[in-house]
Image: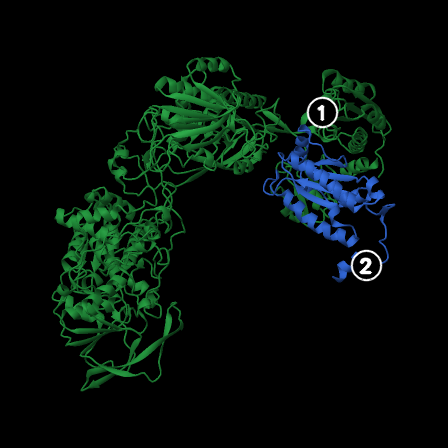
Amino acid sequence: MTDDQQRFEPRIVGFLCNWCAYSGADLAGVSRLQSAPNVRILRVMCSGRVDPSFVFRAFQLGADGVLIAGCHPGDCHYQEGNHKALRRVLLLKRILRGFGVDEHRVRLEWISASEGEKFARVSTEFTEEIRSLGPLPLENGRLLHLPADEPSPVLAEVAG
Amino acid sequence: MSQNGQVRTGVYICHCGVNIAQTVDCAAVRDHAARQPNVVVARDYKFMCSDPGQQMIRDDIQNHKLDRVVVAACSPQMHELTFRHACEEAGLNRYLFQMANIREQCAWIHQNRAQATEKAKALVGGAVRRVTWHRPLEPRVEQVNPNVLVVGAGIGGIQAALEMAEAGREVYLVERESTIGGQMAKFDKTFPTLDCASCILTPKMVSVSHRKNIHLLTLSEVTRVDGYIGNFTATIQTRPRYVTDRCTACGECVKVCPVSVPNWFDEFRSTRTAIYKSFPQAVPNSFLIDKQDRPPCKEACPIGQEASGYIALIRAGKFAEAIRLIRQKNPLPAVCGRVCYHPCEGQCNRGYVDKPLAIQYLKRFAADWEMAHASEIEPPVPAEKHEEPVAIVGSGPAGLACAHDLALAGYPVTIFEALPVAGGMLAVGVPEYRLPKQLVNFEIDYIRRMGVDILTDRRLGRDFTLPQLFGQGFKAVFVATGAHQGLGLGAPGEEAAGIVQGLEFLRITKCAAPMAVGKRVAVVGGGNTAIDCARTALRLGAEVTILYRRSRDEMPALPEEIADAEDEGVVIRYLTAPVGVVQQDGRMRALRCVQMELGEPDASGRRRPIPVAGSEFEMKFDTVLLAIGQRPDLDLAAAAAAGINQARNGTLKVHAETLETGMPGVFAGGDACLGPATVIEAMGMGKRAAESIGKYLRGEPLEHYTTQMVSPGYRRPESCRPHAYAPLYKDTERRERVPMPKLAAAERKTDSREVDLGYSEEEAVREASRCLNCGLCVECLECVRVCEPGAVDHSMIPESIQVQVGQILLATGYRLLDASPMVHYGYGRLENVRTALEFERMLSSTGPTGGKILLENGEEPRAIAVIHCVGSRDENYCRYCSRVCCMYALKFAHLVKDRTHAEVYNFYIDMRAFGKGYEEFYSRVLDEGMNLIRGKVAEVVRASRSLREAGHLLVRCEDTLIGRFREVPVDMVVLCNAMQPQRDVEAVQRVFGISRSPDGFFLERHPKLDPVATTTDGVFIAGCAQGPKDIPDTVAQASAAAARMLATISKGVVEIDPVRAEIDERYCSGCRICNNLCPYSAIEYVEDQNVSRVNAALCKGCGTCVAACPAGAITGYGFTDQQIDAELEGVLGV
């Protein structure tokens, strides 16, 4: 890890569903489980509400990573919203790859209302993962070019 | 993103005492907030949720003309409602408010003050930007259905139900078991007052049964819940009790039930019969029958005969009842007991252990017993009488069975039989030594006595036609003419004399005079007909050779028939087929045959025989009997015009279920449709035809049949044990199948006496006792016979109903941890190691020992150990404390001292005596001289040195108060198992849409302030379903939940947050992507306008469609795209 990375504090946005993940995060708080302070949470009613364009917007506004957390499959308060979230995230990751954004910057987790420990662990782990990935190379809302000797991931996506 | 004009926002940072302020610099956050766009007021205060805090907001709204409010404090799940109401009281729409969670999701989880403060600033910034995009909304007001659903009828459910019923509400009380009362009904005495549990519980149970407004549904479970608070629709499945409410609980049925299984209520330490009542004071006060999977013997039988039923009766020595049961379905028991191909035995589960039950031999035994003991059995009198006469063509098993059933239903029946004798193949096809004429006539006479006319020498086509029958006044016809025409060889020369159809040979020999067949006889074929021909020819003095073109494995004849034939001296040549006849003067002299070998399987799945080139040889015979296949000998030239279709092989085509032919009013069955098949299949079709004809004549639709008609391909499901209470097949003791006594082989050739002699009574009972009672209830129908009020109804089926309720209470209770994996305690392995519930049953006067404390060998114990914390407070099992065990352990100690002279040792870790009167009880019990040892028990072992020595148990632990290792000898160990959530708690959680806490019990809305509500509005929890607790606390929670529900009902309406979706039709292109995404089908497509539209009443506001709309045409109120975008800006802006 370079000095740059050691000083680098990731900024992570979390979309948490009201019924499971948000309650799980509250439980982590009630249990005083300490975790990294890098995750800023937005509450939505269901992980199915998360439009993939929110993720792009978050990156555009300066987020280095985005966490989406919903109920476990089968437990969604609205039956299957989390299934839709899963489908979208899979497609989203492919598109991000095409843009040259490391797909690990988006993470989908299933966290139930009783999984305070899991929420705390995921927050901290994800923060460290983003820290090692480094800041999202963005300047004035545009993705910076990659070093010249690396093949363009866009070409790889299209050719591959 | 442009800001929204004139918005005036007030921001309030809460210290929450030191909870937030200790970690977050609230003043800095306040100052940061003050600099945010549109913020006109920013304050911080110690307790925003307190009265002064809320007043501050109200004053600022008035004085500063605020139109948006942000509070940064605890979780919105905690206080969003509080602050919304504060806004509303000051005249601001409650939805123009946003909370930032800087306590649970900031101050409480970070330690670095700088970082926590930065994060808090970001969260506040997000809230401030978001709230500018809030719009005033009105909550939805819905009526509350005053009915309630209570799930679980233990003491908690009963208490809540009674309180709500008392207030005049309709209560649906659903209980999974057959009786209400839950676990408390199993207890003997309750701590600390030592009240008898039944004495305080049963009056409440009786109240439940008396109250008209409590709708009690036992043996029921809620399988689905739709809707929302105030308007739930619950689907409830009820298992059949098989006993109606005419039951007077007299108990006569128990005396005659032959089945015995472990009793769940006594923790499996006693037995009960298949028809039973859980315990004497059960509510509803009615018996029920435990039926598990349908036994494969009944499922495989083409007439659905209850083999396990009559076998159980034979085993109990009730032979008259056995034959009576058989005759309810089967009019030809003596016949079936001799010639049936017994598909039941092929599927008998005993086959997994050793050999299948000899079901056929037992049926024969019952039939023979009847003939020996009752010279004439009277057929039952039909319940109704009908006028419409029915004609049956053919008096074989299909025709006879059809006639029997129709006569029983009250119809006049006439059978037209082509031959001079009645019985079809039974009379002319099966040889005397297998099925004596006298028997067949006996059974046919029974049917005649039911009023059935049998006219012989009447052949269809020659003497009458089908239209003529209708002309004579018959209203329906059943054609069951069989398949009496033998197939030819298809070889040159077969028209020579000496080549005879096997069927013709059998018929002439049995009904007229024995045919002269000479010394050397060949039989061509490998089925039962071929074997019958061979053994009959043998009895006429010939040397018999069977020529079969495949190998022994492919021979379709019954294995026991083949074995009998070989015992008698029949020679079987396999892989041999005749290809031509050598004749002289028109008479056959020899057969030219060829050797065969087996090639690839053909359409029937058997390997195709292929002639071996150059292997031809000749064999000299006097007579050749052909038994290579049969077809119907019907000539229905006019039939095709009338609508009856024949297949290429001459069989009649019928509708698979109704047995209708194409001709109206004409049904068909038996070999005439199946080709050469079996007696029992023919009977099955005959009985189905009778039911079909009955419906036809009464003008009813031809559907929903009760007669079974099983295809030969039935295969029993895989299993490892016959029913839930039985040992595994591999653990079941092997026993020899009782062989059928037979006439010695040497004696058989001289005459046509029956070869099989039949079981003696002792043999029959011995064989019957091998039956495993696969269905648990064996359907012997003895209970029906002895029930005077006629309350037993074996045909009951599961039911499903839907109820509309406004609120739901879950009081589903607990189960005890299974201690078997804790091998060091020896539960399930050592004798006299019990769980607490088992010990309760032992103490109870209605339990297996009548209230006496006894060891397995019946003696009184000299010393008992009670081990606390078995699985509780244990990292490996349950981390929590089960709360009640210390107290009931003390109760046990007291009762042991009270009833026996035994010493009692309680092994505890901490003593928890927290309730009212508990500490006093503890002192009192101590004074009675019990022994308390502080130390978690390490292991329980046998004191004896070898397994052969009977011995007591040793409890080993460290006595931590004296710091020494101890071994305490005792006779019995009682474990205080941890209380756990019910086994299916995950499935139940999903049905009701609630969460669980980390310990697995249902999650309450707030552990301190709201223990009976859940985060799902309208669903409440009470009792041990929420966490381990004793009876007083369960009752308190149940009453609390009842009060909450009654309060909502008395308000009459609920307000539901208007979080929902709405489609802006200007932007909707009618792409319909959203339509299928909605789990509530709340989006409809308006065809003539080519737009989609959300039904506001059905929409629950998940937002899935909002995210999916490619045009962004859907607004998700409360969570719009602009609001979320603004929040992102704020949260990342720092």
Q: Is residue B192 visible?
A: yes
Residues B1020 and B853: in front is: B853
Q: Residues within 10 Å of mark 2 (few under 14, many from 20)?
A: few
Inspect the image, locate mark 1, and give the three-letter code of the amino acid beneath it: Arg
Please, what secondary structure does the residue beneath circle 1 have? Answer: helix
Inspect the image, locate mark 2, and give the three-letter code of the amino acid beneath it: Pro
Residue B131 sits above or below residue B514 on the image: above
Rendering colour mode: by chain
Q: Which chain wears blue?
A: A
| Residue B1077 x %, y % | 64, 46
Using the numbered discs, state the Cα–Cα distance from disc 2 to disc 1 in whole angstroms. 55 Å
Residues B658 and B1077: in front is: B1077
| Residue B155 x %, y % | 46, 24
Picture quadrant of residue A53: top right
Q: Which residue in the protein does label 2 denote?
A: A151
| Left or right of A70 in this view: B268 | left
Q: Which chain wears green?
A: B
Q: Is residue B1063 visible?
A: no
Residue B650 sits above or below residue B122 on the image: below
The quarter of the image holding the C terminus of chain B is top right
